[in-house]
Image (cartoon, rainbow, N blue to C red):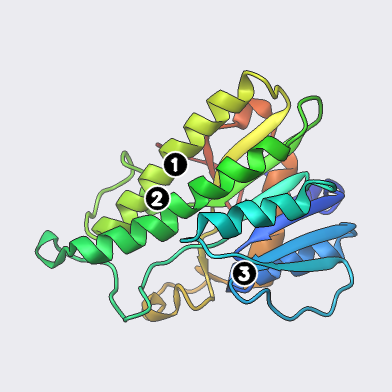
Amino acid sequence: MSAIGKWPDSAPRRAAVFGATGGIGRALCEELARSGCERVYAGSRSAGDWTSEAITPFAFDLKDEASIAAAAGEMRENPPEWVIVASGVLTLADGTGPERTYKRLSAEAMADVLALNTIGPALIAKHVLPLMPRSERFVFAALSARVGSISDNGLGGWHSYRASKAALNMLLKNFALEMGRTHQHGVVVGLHPGTVDSALSRPFQKGLPGGQLTEPGRAAENLLGVLGALGPTDSGKVFDFAGVEVPA
C-alpha cells in the first residue's frame, strides 16, 4: 500500500501528539497544524514553545500516570480524532545505549527502557482511548520500530530496545482487538518511521548508506500520509513510513 499521496486531504480536525518536542514529534505537530488541523494538542515534559495558534501545549511525564490522566482530562471536551505517541528512547539519559550482547544487560537500564517505550505508551492508551468516538473513525498510533519484529530479527542485539518495541506491538494488537468490539471504525497501529535525523538516531548514523536518513519534516509527512490511508482492517498491525506492513 502506498499512502503518501493522500496527505493532507485526510488530515483530522483535532489531533494529539505525546512526545511533541522530539525530532519527529515536533515535526508531526507542525505538519498537522500546517495541514489545517484546527487544534493540535502538543505534549512534552516542559510543554514546549510554539508559534502556531493551532497548537495547544500541555505537560506530561511518561513515568507519571497522574500527569497522563490530567492531560486526557484537558482534552475531554474537544477530544482528538488522532492520537500519536511519538515518545521513546534508544539511549538513556546517562548515556547507556542499546546492548550488543546479553553480557551487557542491566536490570535497571532494561526497566527504564521498558518504562519509556512500552509502559508509558500503554498508560497513554489507557486514558485517551475512552475519549474516542464509537461511531466515527479515529486513530491511535505509537512509534514502534522494525527491530521490534520477531520474525524479521536476523541480527540480535539491542536487547532492551527490541524487547520494548515487541512488547509495545503486542499491546497495540490487544488494544485494537478490545476497541474493535465496541468501536468498529477505529484504527490502532504501530508506526516504523525509518531512520530519522533526530537526537535518538544521531549516535548511530555513522556509516548509514546514502538515502537512508530522513529529515523529520519528510518523515512526518510520510507517517501522517500512512495514517490517513489506514482503515479498521489494518488495526492491530505495524506499518512503515511507506505504508508497508512490518511483520510481527
Is residue 198 rendered to the left or right of residue 16? left
CB atoms of marks 1 and 2 within 8 Å: yes
Which amino acid type corresponds to the residue marked 2 in the rendered image? Lys
> Label 3 amino acid?
Ser
Q: Crowdedness of circle 1 by 10 Å Cα count: few (<14), some, many (20+)? A: many
Image quarter in which the N terminus is found:
top right
Q: Secondary structure at mark 3?
A: strand
Q: Badge 1 is on which residue?
A: 169
Residues at badges 2 and 3 in contact (C-beta under 8 Å)? no
**From mark 2 to mark 3, how far is it between C-alphas?**
21 Å
> How many C-alpha atoms fall within 10 Å of the one at disc 2: few (<14), some, or many (≥20)?
many
Q: Position of residue 94 (x, y in %)?
A: 32, 81
From the viewer's perspective, tell me whether residue 176 is left or right of residue 38.
left
Please report whichever mark, 3 or 1, sits nearer to the chain's N-terminal start. Answer: 3
Query: Which residue occupies the foreground of this view, 115 or 197?
Result: 115
Q: Residue at position x 87%, y 57% from top?
A: 37
What is the quadrant of residue 140 in the picture? top right
Task: Identify the residue at horizontal 68%, vertical 49% (top origin).
Answer: 83
Could you say which quadrant of the image residue 217 lies in?
Answer: bottom right
Residue 14 place in picture, x, y as percent: 83, 51
Disc 3 vs disc 1: which is toward the camera? 3
| Element carrying mark 1 | helix
Seen as rendered, the residue at the extreme top is 181
Q: Which residue is mark 2?
A: 165
Q: CA distance from mark 3 to mark 1?
A: 23 Å
Q: Position of residue 152 (x, y in %)?
A: 33, 44
State which mark lies toward you, 2 or 3: 3
Residue 79 is at least partly visible in this image: yes
Q: Which mark is residue 44?
A: 3
Residue closest to the eye, 56 or 144: 56
Q: Quadrant of residue 176?
A: top right
